[in-house]
Image (cartoon, grey):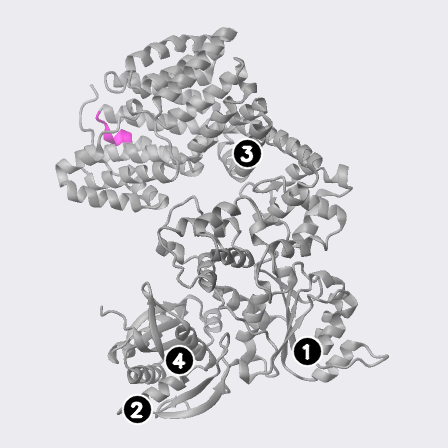
Amino acid sequence: MDPLPTGPVTFLFTDVEGSTRLLERLGPAFGSILTRQAELIRAAVLESGGHVFGTEGDALFAVFAAPADAVRAARASQTALAAEVWPAGISLRVRMGVHTGEGTLGGDNYVGLDVHRVARIAASGHGGQIVASGSTREAVDHGPERFAWLDLGEHRLKDLERPERLYQLTADGLIRQFPPLRTVSTRPNNLPVEMTSFIARGTELQTIGSLVRSSRLVTLTGPAGTGKTRLAVETARELLGEFADGVQFVDLSAVGDAELVGPTIGSTLGAIETPGRPLEQVIAETQGGRESLLVVDTFEHLLAGAPFLGRLLALVPRMKAIVTSRAPLRIAGEQEYAVEPFPTPDPRHSESVAETALNPAIQLFVERARAVRPSFELNGANANAVRAIVARLDGLPLAIELGAAWLRVLAPAAIAERLASGLPMLDSGARDRPTRQQTLRGAIAWSYDLLAPPDQALLLRLGIFSGGADLAAVEAVCAPQEELGLDAFTGLATLIDANLVRQVETDHGDPRFRLLETIRDFARDRLSADPGLLDALGRRHVDYVLRVALEREVDLRGAGLATALDRLDHDHDNLRAALRWCLDQGDAETGIRIATAVWRYWQIRGHLTEGRRLVTELLALPAATARTARRADGLTTLGSLAYWQVDAPATTSAYREALDIHRELGDTDRIATALSNLAFGAMLDSDTAEAATLFGESLPIHRESGDTRGLAATLVALGLLAASDAPVEGRAMMAEAEALYRALDDRYWVSQVQIGTSVVERSAGDLGAARARLASAIVMVDDLEDVSATAQIFDQLASVDLAAGHWERAVRLAAAASRLRDEEGAGRPPPAFARVPDIRAGAAAAIGSERVAEAWADGRRLPRAAAAELARQSAAEPTPLLVSPE
């Protein structure tokens, strides 16, 4: 493909008129119609020497080096579209805009004001119409080919200050008569002129536009800083052409009395109050049969005035309204639309700069960053910091704009670091904003001040939670009924209505309630003014987390594993906060109890490094130095985390000290478990003889004491040790262990036994039996989302594929396992247990190092879901017995 032209170029933008209505009418069949219209336009563009450089929905974007080629392509496209016989009796109309300007490339796309200008020109037209800018007409009029034009006059386009003189291309076969262009200057309005571009809310604009067409009153609700006002204004601009008598904008932010809602609206609409007559009737008479749209901004502090708006709409049947409010109006006919923050990338997961640049929150940051630092570019050096910034700011447009402004003095990494400490950086913004929007703190305080004192107190207390809480947690920690005289659910409902608290549905059915991090920072800042209350809430929070952790510990060992993992996912930030509180307060006892209860969750979900660091810090507290059973529990937890990171010295050291403490205390049952743990540590050092001795020592103690779990774990280890030399014995021990774990309904360990048995079967040469075991394990592990076990399965299937001659798949699976460990925190079992050969070396001997390198790179790129599908294909592969198990 030829490179895209730069310098003076001519753009052609096209899009289908009424595509949403056609989609509603035709359903999936509309897709083939869109494809056909794009084929016709694309053919005309290529025939005229142009380049199609982008598509979005039903829109198509093309560029030409010569202006006449662009005009010729537009004319040919409309002619072809008009000649096409469309199915279902529809008349497909496409509007087109042509503009000549500067072609500046940003990556593989065009950037700059001229791209926005041609988009606005195209949007101003009607289906079947070709609208061109004055620069295009002037350029082609100096060429050899003559085109016919209609002068449509000067127009002000949305978001653009400089008016544009527009022309309609006419030719035989093209429609000549169209309604007036849909530009800002063709409909009366007082919409505020925005000085910044509108970022990435096309879907919301379409949805709200559809709601306005079908409803009389649409209320945009959402927390502070989500961009409700801007979205309402942009929607109104989009709909200008549909309201013959225009759009009127009413700003209520400075109005302090609900009784003034009516007079403020009336004044904007030019109605004069008449003594003795209801104002809504006076307004209705002045509006008559006018078809208009009313945009009423910032209604949340004047909700008592909402009935006036309801009465007005009832009296003026052709008037519609868009309202912005942090709480719904609760009047008849209201259609609520919740404005969400931008979705944000997960800063913990790496992605390319190109992928990052597609995120709308990132796009907003970059756009606003260039306003203060024109040379700013998203690149490999700053992408991670920018991801962290927008994630920390919850994707809130206002917060992102305030954060980007700090690029005047700080690099992105410094902004990200400082934001981690709270809100102070977001205390200055554009002076031409309303006062409440000049700082994010002010925007949140505006909503807070509208609450009754008990609701204010509940909001601040909710700041003690990190990542949200369920109703039981709110009642236990915040004590709303006992200390605030407030029913918890009623208080939460009030805060949800005010868009200060969000309700999040969960898979296990109990809803959770959470604050955006920016609102939580506000709450914590206010709480800090009362150290006694903050300390009391912190103690209650830790006690509640401990209770939850102990309940989940039981579930992690039984049939409730999947639910326990899901619940701990939701409470992970609360776990972190509670453990940090224990460290700050020196409470080693509670911290170790929490960590010991949830370490298996950390292992399954890939939080090994974080968990190990926290436990290490807890054990270093002065209160944890005494040689007690609690210290031994912490050491056992530390050794288990180190084990899954294949850190032999740390594993052995922690397990050995735990064993010594249990021996000092004379705890026979725990001595047996500690012996088994130390044997697992020996496996990391590949000291199979020592491991066998220790396991042999612990086995009879487990049997005699009736410690089913200890017995089963020891049998698994001994079965793996016997895999090569005594596979029959190995199978028998694995079978006994599986039966014990199934009796306990312990799904985690049943899946581990399946993986371990596959090692025994592979060592015996029965690859088919190994695949069958791994196929069974995949089902369990998928359900549990166990990242560590997933990596184990990938490794084991890679080993089976290598032995069976599926070399490239073997390498891809091994690479996928490697990525899970490097990027998602998956743990690794000891090599003496896993018995995974060098997959790359083995495959290279058969297919060469170059193909191995390609397969490895491909496997490292696979997302977990795609790699899991590859693993399922491998597990389903029919494989004969390769060698005799004897």
- Residue 298, image x, y percentages: 66, 64
Tell me which numbered mark, 2 or 4, is placed earlier along the sequence.
4
Which residue matches tag 2? Answer: 142
Task: Write down the region rendered in magenta.
Answer: 765-770
Q: Secondary structure at mark 4?
A: strand
Which residue matches tag 4? Answer: 96
Q: Between label 3 and label 1, give the one nearer the viewer.
A: 3
**Residue type at mark 1?**
Pro
Q: Between label 2 and label 3, give the one nearer the viewer.
A: 2
Q: Between label 4 and label 1, give the one nearer the viewer.
A: 4
Q: Secondary structure at mark 1?
A: loop
In terms of secondary structure, what is the magenta stretch mainly? helix
Res 764 quadrant in image: top left
Tell me which numbered mark, 4 or 3, is placed earlier along the sequence.
4
In the rendered structure, does residue 769 fall within the stretch colored magenta?
yes
**Residue type at mark 4?**
Met
Residue 575 image label: 3
The residues bearing labels 2 and 4 have C-alpha atoms spaced at a distance of 22 Å
Q: Secondary structure at mark 2?
A: loop
Tell me which numbered mark, 2 or 3, is placed earlier along the sequence.
2
Please tell me how crowded label 4 is: few (under 14), some (14-19), or many (20+) other residues with Cα within 10 Å.
many
Q: Is residue 167 left or right of residue 852?
A: right
